[in-house]
Amino acid sequence: MMEELELRQDQLRRWTKVRHQQAFDEIKSLIVGLSLQNMERVGERPVEEEERENRDGRIKRGWSHSTKLEFSRFDGEGLKGWLLRADYFFEVAGVPVDERVKIAALHLEGKALQRHQGFIKIKGNVAYEDWETYVVALIARFGSNAFEDLLADLWNLK
C-alpha cells in the first residue's frame, strides 16, 4: 500500500513537472509575441531587422523608434511636393526602385487613383517596375503644364 502511494506521488510529480514546463513555454511564447507587437506599435525593430543590405552592398540602419515614417497621400493636387516627399520616403526607408510604384499606388486617391488604374491597364504589370516612367506619366497628367481633364469636369457639373 505504501509503495503504491509513493509510486502515485512520483507519477504526480512528473506529471506536474511536465505541465509546469508546458505552461512556462506557453507563457514565454506569449511574452515574445507581446514584445513583437509592442515593437511594431512603437515603430522599433530588433537590430537584426534594422540592418539590411542596399543594392550597392552598403548596410543601412533603420531609423530610431522615435521617427515615424508616413507616405503622403496624392489626389492629383500638388504633384511637385508629393513627388519630393515620395523620393525622400523611398530614400530614407531604403525602398528598392522596382517596388516604388506599388507603394505609391497604395497612397493614391481620387483622380490620381483613376489615372493609375488606366495606366496599369495600358502598360500591364511592367508599369510597376519603372518608377521614372511612372513619374513622367504623372507629370504629363497632373503637372503644372498638363491640360485639364475637361470631360471629367463637365461630368462633375451635372
Image (cartoon, rainbow, N blue to C red):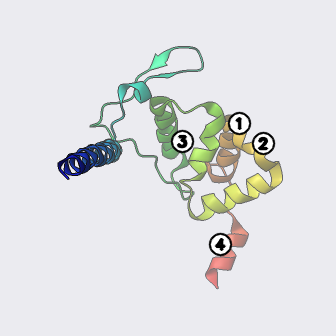
- For the residues bearing labels 1 and 3, Cβ distance under 8 angstroms: no
Which is more N-terminal, label 4 or label 1?
A: 1
82 relative to 8 in the view: left or right: right
Residue occupying image coordinates x 22% and y 46%? 3
Label 3 close to label 2 by CB (< 8 Å): no
Mark 3 = which residue?
Answer: 83
- Assess disc 3: are there few (<14), some (14-19) or many (≥20) residues with their C-alpha within 10 Å of its C-alpha: some
Type of residue at label 1?
A: Asp
Report x, y in % for residue 64.
Answer: 30, 31
Q: On the image, numbered disc 4 is attached to which residue? A: 153
- Outermost residue, top direction? 57
Q: Earlier in the sequence, mark 3 or mark 4?
A: 3
The image shows residue 158, relative to residue 71, as above or below, that is below
Tell me whether circle 3 and circle 4 mark residues in contact (CB < 8 Å).
no
Which residue in the structure is indicated by mark 1?
Answer: 130
57 relative to 66 in the view: left or right? right
* For residue 66, side relative to residue 107 (left or right): left
Mark 4–mark 2 CB contact (< 8 Å): no
- State which mark lies toward you, 1 or 3: 1
Between 16 and 36, the one nearer to me in the picture: 16
Q: Residue furthest left?
A: 2
Kindly check if marks 2 and 1 are in contact, taking CB atoms under 8 A apart as contact.
Answer: yes
For marks 4 and 2, give the one nearer the viewer.
Answer: 2
- Labels 1 and 3: the sequence-earlier one: 3
Q: Quick one: label 4 or label 2, which is nearer the N terminus?
A: 2
* Horizontal and vertical percent position of residue 21: 29, 42
Question: Considering only vertical position in the picture, is 107 above or below 14?
Answer: below
- Numbered disc 4: secondary structure: helix
Name the residue carrying label 2. 126
Q: Residue at image x 60%, y 20%?
A: 55
